[in-house]
Image: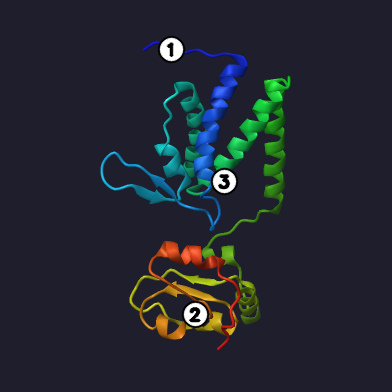
Amino acid sequence: MAKYILYNEDARRALERGIDALAEAVAVTLSPKGRNVVLEKKYGAPQIINDGVTIAKEIELEDHIENTGVSLIRQAAAKTNDAAGDGTTTATVLAHAMMKEGLRNVAAGSNPIALKRGIDKATQFLVNKVAQHARSVSDSKSIAGEATHADKNELMGGAVATLFPITWREPFGLVMVESMAAGTPVIAMNLGSAPEVINPGVSGFLCNDVSECVNATSIGGCNCRI
């Protein structure tokens, strides 16, 4: 197949259109309040998903130069997924921002090699700063730290809501009672005795699947002390 070759600003703009297309599709899924993306499947029903790396793998553009830009951002998401197992959407957003600003500076006359060296220096500086505050942990208790009852009550009292995406027959338990006692809205599955305890829209929210539970975290404060 014949190769289509672009140079200078034309090449940069084509790459930019590609990275914009992927980043805009992935960025909407960022954060717990992020939205879902619907993917067309060649066979079967469409897929509704909010996983950044999965969305990135599905995007392919008709223009080959623009598709090269897609591949650059996709690589950043894939490497993050391999290294950490999470953070693919954040990696995509950061890579997109750095490439956009880099292309803008190159178009304004900056030296690309000097820009790359500056990014490397800034990256190393930030990594060193994080390392200064890091401490080694050996188990999950060390990660979470020890908490007193007062700490737990303060945490629950300041929370937007307590999420219980529990799908077995009886999701009700002590933690749910403690949350309501602290005045924290409870978001739980519409199962077991939960409907008898939770007053929807007042003391919490009942949902029928996990995605509904996540979306319900936007519920406001409730008069839910018991």
Residue at 71% of width from left, 50% of height from top?
132
Q: Is residue 54 visible?
A: yes
Q: Earlier in the sequence, mark 2 or mark 3?
A: 3
Residue 212 spot, x, y in % from top left: 44, 64
Residue at 51% of width from left, 35% of height from top?
21
Q: Tell me where residue 226 sits by quadrant.
A: bottom right
Q: How busy is the neighbourhood of tag 1: few (under 14 within 10 Å), some, or many (20 plus)?
A: few
Query: What label does residue 176 carry, if any?
Result: 2
Q: Secondary structure at mark 3?
A: helix
CB-based contact (under 8 Å), mark 3 and mark 1: no
Query: What label does residue 3 carry, if any?
Result: 1
In the rendered view, tell whether residue 158 sits above or below residue 66. below
Q: Earlier in the sequence, mark 1 or mark 2?
A: 1
Q: Secondary structure at mark 2?
A: helix
Q: How busy is the neighbourhood of tag 3: few (under 14 within 10 Å), some, or many (20 plus)?
A: some
Residue at 66% of width from left, 28% of height from top?
102
| Cα–Cα gap, marks 1 and 2 | 62 Å
Residue 67 spot, x, y in % from top left: 46, 27
Residue, disc 3: 90
| Cα–Cα gap, marks 2 and 3 | 32 Å
Q: How busy is the neighbourhood of tag 2: few (under 14 within 10 Å), some, or many (20 plus)?
A: many
